[in-house]
Image (cartoon, helix red, strand yellow):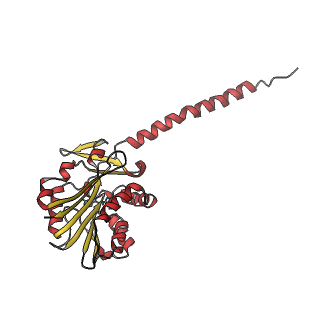
């Protein structure tokens, strides 16, 4: 006769209970993770300086290096590059140059000068290091571009103008700094795309809050419409050369190239 181990049913039930418990925890883990990802992030006290807060700049630079060359990044850069004509007598400024990767590429084209403007100290420090030329990176923003009147041939900005609170002031500044016939070339988050994502209200206006790089870098910027980008002030100072709505299935970037009137 086979002898039964009296402990056997108990051991099996404990193991079964453990397995069921672990399996049941998996969806709970997913829910907690989703909640964490979807949670609104703190509203930055200073929109322009937000890359200096909460590790945003450091994380942006790390993920940007990891994702370098992705198709959406390349399409923005391609648009800007397609409108540049370098020359030993031409000057370019990259406004919101971030860590300086694009600026390195512009400098290789052979401009007389190719300099950057940044309002985040973290990003400016990274750009200075990247270029090995501290004097080429200046503190400023789209609403305060630290260059003389009629001094530049190109003002470019990849993913920076949408952070600007006052687009019309940015256009006035750009028109002031550009030489007659100079070009403004920008690529921004497409309003038709970002409008559908989470927005919050502050001081009577709406702000987009999203997380870049697969939900890992939280950023906040004013919700601008396409009409805001192509405002009467824009039209007063610039003639639109090309507008592109970039995106494979739906527009996710708005690209604008314009010449001073
Ligand atoms: C998404 S990063 C893009 C950086 C770089 N252009 C690139 O393509 O990697 C946005 C940059 O815009 C800067 N920025 C934020 N507000 C700005 C403003 N009002 N004017 C100019 N730059 C701004 C940020 O500090 C940050 O470096």
Q: Is residue 47 visible?
A: no
Left or right side of 8 for 21: left
Q: Quadrant of ligand 1?
A: bottom left
Q: Nearer the viewer, residue 43 or 166?
A: 166
Residue 78 can be seen, yes or no: yes
Left or right: residue 194 versus residue 152 is: right
- Quarter residue 77 falls in: bottom left
Q: Is residue 190 above or below residue 97?
A: above
**Quadrant of the rendered structure where residue 13 is?**
top right
**Where residue 135 appears, x then y in whole percent?**
30, 76
Instruction: Please tell me which residue is depicted at 77% across the width and 23% down the height of the picture.
Output: 6
Spot occupied by residue 153 in the image (x, y as percentages of width and height): 22, 71
Residue 188 versus residue 129 in the image, above or below: above
Q: Measured from the top left, where is residue 191 in percent x and y?
A: 26, 47
Left or right relative to 40: residue 27 = right
Quadrant of the image containing the N terminus: top right
Where residue 129 appears, as percent x and y from the top left, is 38, 72
The quarter of the image holding the C terminus is bottom left
Name the outermost residue toward the top.
Answer: 1
Q: Farthest residue in the right direction?
A: 1
Front position in the image: 83 or 228:
83
Residue at left 36%, top 71%?
Answer: 104
Q: How many labels sit on residues? A: 0
Q: Is residue 17 above or below residue 127?
A: above
């Amino acid at each position: 006769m086979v002898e039964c181990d009296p402990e056997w049913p108990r051991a099996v039930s404990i193991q079964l209970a453990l397995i069921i418990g672990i399996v049941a925890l998996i969806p709970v883990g997913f829910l907690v993770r989703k909640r964490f990802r979807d949670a609104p992030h703190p509203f930055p006290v200073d929109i322009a300086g937000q890359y200096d807060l909460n590790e945003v700049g450091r994380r942006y630079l790390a993920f940007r290096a990891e994702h370098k060359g992705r198709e959406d990044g390349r399409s923005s850069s391609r648009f800007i590059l397609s409108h540049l004509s370098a020359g030993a007598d031409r000057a370019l400024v990259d406004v919101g140059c971030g860590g300086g990767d694009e600026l390195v590429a512009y400098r290789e084209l052979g401009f007389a000068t190719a300099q950057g403007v940044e309002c985040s100290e973290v990003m400016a420090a990274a750009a200075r290091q990247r270029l090995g030329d501290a004097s080429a990176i200046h503190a400023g923003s789209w609403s305060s571009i630290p260059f003389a009147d009629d001094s530049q041939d190109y003002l470019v900005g990849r993913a920076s103008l949408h952070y600007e609170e006052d687009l019309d002031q940015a256009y006035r500044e750009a028109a002031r700094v550009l030489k007659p016939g100079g070009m403004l070339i920008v690529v921004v988050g497409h309003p038709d795309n970002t409008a559908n994502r989470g927005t919050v209200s502050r001081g009577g206006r709406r702000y987009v809050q999203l997380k870049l790089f697969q939900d890992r870098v939280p950023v906040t910027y004013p919700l601008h419409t396409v009409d805001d980008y192509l405002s009467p002030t824009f039209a007063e100072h610039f003639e639109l050369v090309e507008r592109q709505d970039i995106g494979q299935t739906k527009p996710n970037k708005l690209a604008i190239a314009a010449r001073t009137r």
